[in-house]
Amino acid sequence: MQDFQLTRPSNPGATNVLRLGSKLTAATVLVLDILKGTIPVWSAYFLGIEPLYLGFVALAACLGHMYPIFFEFKGGKAVATAFGVLLPIGLDLGLLLVTTWLLVAKATKYSSLAAIVTVSLAPFYTWFLKDAYVYPVMMLSALIIFRHRENIVRLIQGKENKISTKINL
């Protein structure tokens, strides 16, 4: 009897799923990853949890995506999950984040650079919109940038993968 092993991307994030699969599969992964962040943070918010502790809930959701026990602690970069945890701050913040990501991705064709720029700007956007959440967003941004350290090296070396030209942004 032959061993059967499922092929999966190097990490289960939506960008890698898009590279290996269909747009529908990637969109499904994206929505589920966003909900993975939104549901716990919104739940904690409705329980009256303070902003700093909401930040810890957000970090836990993202760390769970980055280091999932079911994938031998090899997960994604948690960009969509981070977006999900930031949505409860406000839809205006969500719109700013999506717009920033799309503009950078369209201009550079680098998903990782778009994510890095977007999370770098997230604390500034938050400061203008709801400053009580700046410190939790800063913690989250630092975590996402840390998780992108290999991408940053590849970007500097000119070896980072671009978003495929067949994908219309």
Image (cartoon, rainbow, N blue to C red):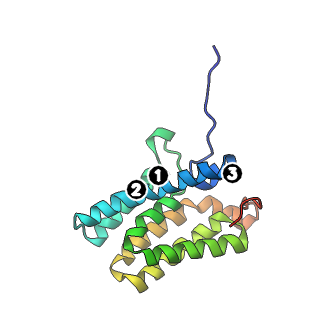
Helix, strand or loop for disc 2: helix
Q: Which residue is mark 1?
A: 65
Instruction: Identify the residue at horizontal 76%, vertical 59% (top origin).
Output: 166
Q: Which residue is mark 2?
A: 61
Mark found first going from the N terminus, 1 or 3: 3
- Compare residues 42 and 73 and report the one nearer the observer: 42
State the image quarter where residue 14 is shown. bottom right
Residue type, mark 2 in image: Ala
Say which residue label 3 marks. Answer: 19
**Residue type at numbered disc 3:** Arg
Q: Quadrant of residue 131?
A: bottom left
Whole-percent x, y for residue 59 in the image: 39, 60
Q: Amino acid at mark 1?
A: His
Residue shown at 52% from the left, 61% from the top: 79
Circles 1 and 3, Cβ within 8 Å, touching? The answer is no
Q: Looking at the image, do the residues carrying marks 2 and 3 touch, with CB atoms under 8 Å apart?
A: no
Closer-to-camera residue (152/91): 91
Label 3: how many Cα within 10 Å (few below 14, some 14–19, many 20+): some
Label 2 neighbour load within 10 Å: few <14, some 14-19, many 20+: many
